[in-house]
Amino acid sequence: MEYGRLIVALATPFRPDLEVDYDKTAELARRLVAEGATAFVSAGTTGESPTLSREERIELIKTLKKAVRVPIIANVGTNDTRASIRNAKDAEEAGVDGLLLVVPYYNKPDQGMLYDHFKAIAESVKIPSMLYNVPGRTAASVRPETVVKLSREVPNIRYVKEASGDLEALTQIVRDSAPGFRAYTGDDSMTLPSLAVGAYGVVSVSGHVIGKQMKEMIEAYVAGYVVKAAELHGKLLPLNRALFLQPNPVPLKAALKLCGFDAGSLRPPLKDASLEVVQALKKALLDLGLLP
């Protein structure tokens, strides 16, 4: 499955009553494909996964499959292996193209337990899986050698989203993993450094508002125009930082609204962005020429 280099972790639009707005979800996806998105993650962190029901996750997949012709990757991982397998089978039945498997949170399994967890989920379905390492949220981390072992021993595990910010770990994964295994960064501000050590692309939040610019930067680097890519990286850095001044996707939904797409509010316990964050986003967007 070819996911491309700019995967967007899609926000979930809500109506005023905080029910999922499926029409706006489709509209947002079509807008982002036009701006360069090559695939989507559905119901991930950016999509407010902790507050989505099983039925909503399934309907989001069906909505996106009808709306766009790029691959859809469903976030199905939890800290319960049995529940994750159920989610994986739900997603496969709904027609999804791949799975995202986050490191289990709160219960902090060791590396052997992580290996067994990921293997069990991946082998419960026929579609490919992407591991997701984000220790800032999970309080646990899958080590590079475990990723490498999974890539070599579990054929369905073909990708990793590495969001630890550890370039040494990413380098080890790229160097030692099975042929054809692809690594993506999960940190927008680390996209260019990650490409430099061999990552294939990014699973992006910023791509909601600077998809064209992110695509341009990636394509410049791949084509060998390293100086141009570095210049773009520097220009995009303030916005990439502003988008994480509060927990994702709080600033993102504010940024989308500033850019003319109202994705609604957030389900509690998350709340709308603070005035200070909105002002920082506005300045970053203005400096990039993205607001009047």
Image (tube, rainbow, N blue to C red):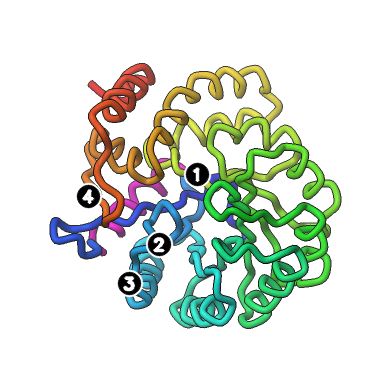
Distance, label 2 to label 1, CA atoms, is 16 Å
Q: Is residue 138 left or right of residue 253?
A: right
Note whether 168 is above or below 118 in the view shown.
Answer: above
Name the mark nearer the viewer: 4 or 1.
Answer: 4
Residue 138 in the image, given as x and y percentages of width and height: 56, 55
The amino acid marked with disc number 4 is Ser
Q: Which mark is residue 204?
A: 1
Using the rendered view, name the quadrant where residue 113 is placed. Answer: bottom right
State the residue position of label 4. Answer: 265
Counting residues from the start of the chain, the first of labels 2 and 3 encountered is 2
Q: Which residues are magenta?
A: 22-36
How crowded is the residue under tag 4: few (<14 C-alpha within 10 Å), some, or many (20+)?
many
Distance, label 2 to label 4, CA atoms, is 15 Å
Distance, label 1 to label 3, CA atoms, is 22 Å
How crowded is the residue under tag 2: few (<14 C-alpha within 10 Å), some, or many (20+)?
some
Using the rendered view, name the quadrant where residue 12 is placed. Answer: bottom left
Distance, label 3 to label 4, CA atoms, is 17 Å
Q: Is residue 118 left or right of residue 285?
A: right
The amino acid marked with disc number 2 is Ser
Residue 85 in the image, given as x and y percentages of width and height: 56, 80
Q: Is residue 28 magenta?
A: yes
Q: Residue at x 34, y 73 (%)?
A: 53
Looking at the image, can residue 101 be seen?
no
State the residue position of label 2. Answer: 49
Furthest residue in direction front, as rendered: 107
